[in-house]
Image: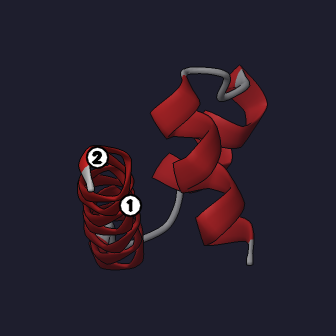
Amino acid sequence: MKVVASVLAALFGVQSEANRQRDFSHSSPLPFILTGVVLVSLFVLGLIALVNWVLA
């Protein structure tokens, strides 16, 4: 859950320095990368669905 919160904060640009340091202390960035890809994909798909709904 902390990974999702950190990725969401980073996407909105409100990540605190303490949380950023905590995130970069992990040995593997893979959970952050995968979570970021999933969240951005969901955001893009949501925008596509919204535009299609509005134009329908």
Asked which colour scheme the image uses, the reply is secondary structure
Q: Does residue 9 sit above or below 23 in this rendering?
A: above
Q: Amino acid at mark 1?
A: Gly
Which quarter of the rendering shows the C terminus? bottom left
Point out which mark residue 46 bears.
1
Percent x, y for residue 20? Answer: 59, 37
Q: Amino acid at mark 2?
A: Val
Percent x, y for residue 11? Answer: 47, 36
Q: Is residue 31 toward the left or the right of residue 23 in the image?
A: left
Percent x, y for residue 38? Answer: 33, 74
Q: Nearer the viewer, residue 40 or 45?
A: 45
Which quarter of the rendering shows the N terminus? bottom right
Q: Nearer the viewer, mark 2 or mark 1?
A: 2
Q: Secondary structure at mark 1?
A: helix
Point out which mark residue 24 bears.
none
Q: Is residue 37 toward the left or the right of residue 28 in the image?
A: left
